[in-house]
Image (tube, grey):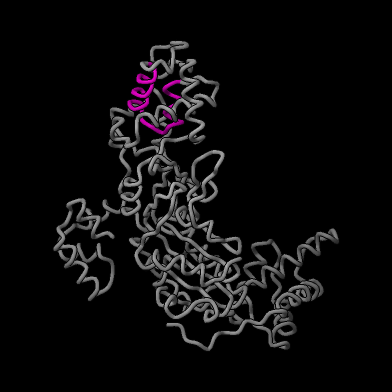
Amino acid sequence: MLGDMLVSERLITPEQRDRALDRQKKLGGRIGDAMVELGYLSSGELERIFHRVPPAPRDLEQAGIPETFLIDLMLKNAYFDGQVLSVADMIGKLCLPMRVVDDLVDKAKRDRLLSLRTAAGSMSGTYLYELTNLGRERTELALAQSQYTGPAPITLQAYRDIVAHQTVRQIEIDAAWMRQAMRHLVIGDSLLNRLGPAFNSGRSIFLYGPPGSGKSSIAEAIGRELPGEIYVPHALMVDGQVIRVFDPALHVPVNDVAKSAALSPQSSLDLDLGTRHDMRWVRCRRPVVMVGGELTLESLNLEYDTISKFYQAPVQMKATNGMFIVDDFGRQQIPPRQLLNRWIVPLERGTDFLRLHTGKKLEISFDQITVFATNLNPAELADEAFLRRLRHKIMVPYQTEKEFLQTFERVCHAQGIAYQPEVATHLINRFYRERGRKFTGSHPRDLIEQVIDRARFRRELPELSIEAIDAAATEVAIASTTFEWRRSSRKLR
């Protein structure tokens, strides 16, 4: 994908791409590093390639969206805002530069869709306009076609270009980074040494093991610390249809000083576009999207609202350039093999296909670290053909006694409860060694929560005593002994 992108942008030749691919196949590593080693690109050029900023459009043509659509969008935004607008307000609502919004307002005035209401002040950006009767009629027609309001969308091609430039496969992490990312978890060196290369690859990962061993916590912890920032579009337009992508519940914006300047009518936005990114994109941390038993095939497709008449992007698209975690895999409402078949093409080719309700099919980049986490027998979930497509298969085992005690002590400190070694020893002897119970990493949290709940009911300060831990361990034991996880004897390839 990177090689083709660099060829299309004429940064390298097709022959150089092919030589770099050959070198990558022989020596491993990333194709970008191969190009630097071959002298086709400098390390500085490679760094700029992976940190491209969406440039702000200087005019309507560069915005890439039909002028009539943008005027309709401006009118709809004004319609729901008292049927009045100013250029300054529309810069913020449409996320377009002043020069572009000025052009839209001028065209709307010429078409008698807007009329000047007040002209207080010397700055044209502060002039207040109102919808005319003709403007209200056109707005109502536009709303009948789509009720989307908000930032102007981008084109599908612009989306593909930026996604390719900020691919998750170019991230680089090492052992020190992994330890820092999982500093709040107790992870053995053996497991850490397997997790590191897997997540550094930017490829698919299959985490399996007994319940409570920390599979989901590991994936989330690494996802939250993924290096680099990306740009996520508010929305994109395909074949006249709007797809909303940015989700405030999943995308975490990074503070952007330029945005406050861009929204000011006094800013030098049009004079200094080179330092301002296209505000139709939101600069964010790499997303981490987790789904569980609620996942269905329908949620992996575009969601069309028949009332508002625009789309919501599916969950895996919102995870683009980040991490997509399928938790409790195998416990969804549909057969796991049917769900896995949905990912065969995306995992192999790095592209996904979505369909509009009009029947048009669109191709988008499938650029994410996809993690399948399960406590079920892998052999019962997928066949060898699919397991081969998953780059890394990692068993997350029960904790050792030492790791369990470390986790128990950390949980006590985190909850403000004094750690008592003699109580921990009593817990280990009575409820684990004597009963042959495995050391489950989630038990310390469950036990301390039970201690806290008991103390609150009794109107006491929670403390780690033998009496309290015996009561807590009885509750936890009831849940943990009802299910025994058996590791498959079948070796994963």
Farthest right residue in view = 458
Compared across the picture, whether 285 is left or right of 470 comes to left
What residue is shown at x 44% (from left), y 66% (from top)?
343
Q: Nearer the viewer, residue 151 or 296?
A: 296
Q: Is residue 261 visible?
A: yes
Q: How far from the left and from the top, in percent, is residue 35?
A: 20, 63
Query: In which quadrant of the rendered image does the N terminus lie?
Result: bottom left
> In the image, is residue 268 part of the stretch drawn in magenta?
no
The vertical placement of 19 against 377, above or below, is above
In screen coordinates, is 82 left or right of 4? right
Q: Residue at x 58, y 67 (%)?
A: 334
**Magenta: predominant secondary structure element?**
helix
Towards the viewer: 472 or 75: 75
Classify residue 111 by image quadrant. Answer: top left
Front one among 301 and 458: 301
Residue 200 in sight from this viewpoint? no
In the image, 58 versus 276, the foreground residue is: 58
**In the rendering, at what x and y percent does residue 352 appear?**
40, 59
- x, y percentage for residue 10? 17, 52
State whether residue 393 is above or below residue 238: below
Q: Which residues are magenta?
A: 86-109
Q: Residue at x 40, y 19 (%)?
A: 125
Quarter the C terminus occupies: bottom left
- Say how many tags the image has: 0
In the image, 204: left or right of 219?
Answer: left
Residue found at the far front of this picture: 359
Image coordinates for residue 59, horizontal then vertical, percent: 29, 30
Q: Quadrant of residue 200?
A: bottom left
Residue shown at 57% from the left, 84% from the top: 487
When the figure is inspected, residue 7 is found, relative to residue 245, above or below; the finding is below
